[in-house]
Amino acid sequence: MLVAFRYFLYLSQRWMKQKAAGSWRLLALPAHCLFFFGWQQTNWLNSRKEAIIFQPSITVTSTPDKTGEELFVLHEGTKVRIVERFRDWIRVRIGDGNTGWVPEKVAKEI
Protein backbone atom coordinates (compact mmCIF):
# COMPACT_ATOMS: atom_id res chain seq x y z
CA MET A 1 0.00 0.00 0.00
CA LEU A 2 2.79 2.38 0.90
CA VAL A 3 4.65 1.69 -2.34
CA ALA A 4 1.51 2.39 -4.37
CA PHE A 5 0.94 5.60 -2.43
CA ARG A 6 4.55 6.68 -2.98
CA TYR A 7 4.25 6.06 -6.71
CA PHE A 8 1.05 8.10 -6.70
CA LEU A 9 2.84 11.04 -5.09
CA TYR A 10 5.96 11.04 -7.28
CA LEU A 11 4.74 9.98 -10.72
CA SER A 12 3.93 12.73 -13.16
CA GLN A 13 1.96 10.86 -15.82
CA ARG A 14 -1.75 10.85 -15.22
CA TRP A 15 -2.43 7.22 -16.24
CA MET A 16 0.38 6.02 -13.95
CA LYS A 17 -1.11 8.01 -11.06
CA GLN A 18 -4.49 6.41 -11.72
CA LYS A 19 -2.96 2.92 -11.67
CA ALA A 20 -1.16 3.69 -8.41
CA ALA A 21 -4.33 5.10 -6.84
CA GLY A 22 -6.32 2.06 -7.98
CA SER A 23 -3.71 -0.27 -6.50
CA TRP A 24 -3.77 1.66 -3.24
CA ARG A 25 -7.56 1.41 -3.05
CA LEU A 26 -7.49 -2.27 -3.91
CA LEU A 27 -5.01 -2.98 -1.11
CA ALA A 28 -6.73 -0.74 1.45
CA LEU A 29 -9.78 -3.00 1.86
CA PRO A 30 -7.85 -6.17 2.85
CA ALA A 31 -5.64 -4.09 5.15
CA HIS A 32 -8.69 -2.70 6.95
CA CYS A 33 -10.22 -6.17 7.21
CA LEU A 34 -7.01 -7.58 8.71
CA PHE A 35 -6.86 -4.71 11.19
CA PHE A 36 -10.48 -5.33 12.22
CA PHE A 37 -9.98 -9.09 12.70
CA GLY A 38 -6.79 -8.47 14.71
CA TRP A 39 -8.60 -5.97 16.92
CA GLN A 40 -11.47 -8.42 17.41
CA GLN A 41 -9.08 -11.25 18.32
CA THR A 42 -7.30 -9.04 20.86
CA ASN A 43 -10.60 -8.12 22.50
CA TRP A 44 -11.63 -11.77 22.65
CA LEU A 45 -8.35 -12.83 24.25
CA ASN A 46 -8.48 -10.01 26.80
CA SER A 47 -12.08 -10.76 27.75
CA ARG A 48 -11.30 -14.38 28.65
CA LYS A 49 -10.99 -14.38 32.43
CA GLU A 50 -9.90 -17.59 34.08
CA ALA A 51 -9.24 -18.59 37.66
CA ILE A 52 -7.87 -21.45 39.73
CA ILE A 53 -9.73 -22.85 42.75
CA PHE A 54 -7.59 -22.49 45.89
CA GLN A 55 -9.70 -24.36 48.43
CA PRO A 56 -9.54 -28.14 49.01
CA SER A 57 -13.14 -28.50 47.80
CA ILE A 58 -16.03 -26.14 47.18
CA THR A 59 -19.66 -26.82 46.34
CA VAL A 60 -20.91 -24.90 43.32
CA THR A 61 -24.42 -23.51 43.77
CA SER A 62 -27.16 -22.52 41.34
CA THR A 63 -27.56 -19.00 42.78
CA PRO A 64 -25.08 -16.50 44.21
CA ASP A 65 -25.85 -17.31 47.85
CA LYS A 66 -25.37 -20.19 50.26
CA THR A 67 -29.03 -21.27 50.02
CA GLY A 68 -28.83 -22.14 46.32
CA GLU A 69 -29.15 -25.68 45.03
CA GLU A 70 -25.86 -27.61 45.16
CA LEU A 71 -24.84 -28.49 41.60
CA PHE A 72 -21.39 -30.09 41.77
CA VAL A 73 -18.10 -29.99 43.68
CA LEU A 74 -14.85 -28.41 42.53
CA HIS A 75 -11.48 -29.39 43.97
CA GLU A 76 -8.32 -27.41 44.55
CA GLY A 77 -6.37 -26.69 41.37
CA THR A 78 -9.37 -26.79 39.03
CA LYS A 79 -9.18 -24.19 36.27
CA VAL A 80 -12.46 -22.36 35.65
CA ARG A 81 -13.63 -19.58 33.38
CA ILE A 82 -15.23 -16.54 35.02
CA VAL A 83 -18.54 -15.85 33.29
CA GLU A 84 -20.10 -13.23 35.55
CA ARG A 85 -19.58 -11.38 38.82
CA PHE A 86 -22.23 -10.47 41.40
CA ARG A 87 -21.24 -8.87 44.70
CA ASP A 88 -18.67 -11.25 46.23
CA TRP A 89 -19.68 -14.24 44.07
CA ILE A 90 -18.48 -15.35 40.65
CA ARG A 91 -20.29 -17.50 38.13
CA VAL A 92 -17.86 -20.06 36.74
CA ARG A 93 -17.89 -22.46 33.81
CA ILE A 94 -15.82 -25.62 33.82
CA GLY A 95 -14.47 -27.56 30.85
CA ASP A 96 -17.55 -29.73 30.32
CA GLY A 97 -19.83 -26.67 30.10
CA ASN A 98 -21.40 -26.81 33.57
CA THR A 99 -21.85 -23.44 35.25
CA GLY A 100 -22.57 -22.31 38.78
CA TRP A 101 -21.71 -19.79 41.49
CA VAL A 102 -18.84 -19.86 43.98
CA PRO A 103 -17.62 -17.28 46.49
CA GLU A 104 -15.02 -15.01 44.92
CA LYS A 105 -12.54 -15.62 47.74
CA VAL A 106 -12.09 -19.33 46.85
CA ALA A 107 -10.65 -18.61 43.39
CA LYS A 108 -7.66 -16.58 42.24
CA GLU A 109 -7.85 -14.98 38.82
CA ILE A 110 -5.02 -15.79 36.41
Image (cartoon, rainbow, N blue to C red):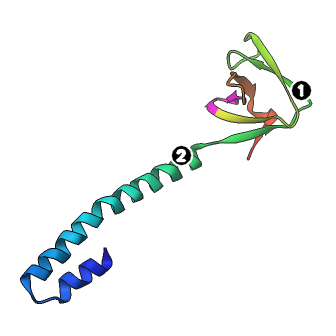
Q: Is residue 83 above or below residue 98?
A: below
Of the numbered discs 2 and 1, the one sitting upstream in the chain is: 2
Secondary structure under the numbered disc 1 in the rendered image: strand
Secondary structure under the numbered disc 2 in the rendered image: helix
Q: Is residue 107 above or below residue 26?
A: above
Residue 59 horizontal side relative to residue 84, left or right = right
Q: CA distance from mark 2 to mark 1?
A: 30 Å
Q: Is residue 90 visible?
A: no
| In-front residue for pair 15/44 | 15
Q: Which residue is mark 1?
A: 57
Q: Which amino acid type corresponds to the residue marked 2 in the rendered image?
A: Trp
> Residue 91 appears at what percent x and percent y?
67, 27
Residue 73 horizontal side relative to residue 97, left or right = right
Residue at point 61%, 43% (across, down): 48
Report the quarter where the N terminus lies: bottom left
Circle nearer the viewer, 2 or 1: 2
Quarter-of-image position of residue 80: top right
Q: Which residues are magenta?
A: 83-93
> Residue 86 appears at what percent x and percent y?
63, 28
Quarter-of-image position of residue 102: top right
Residue at point 40%, 58% (across, down): 34
| In-front residue for pair 67/21 | 21
Residue at point 12%, 75% (across, down): 18
Q: Which residue is mark 2?
A: 44
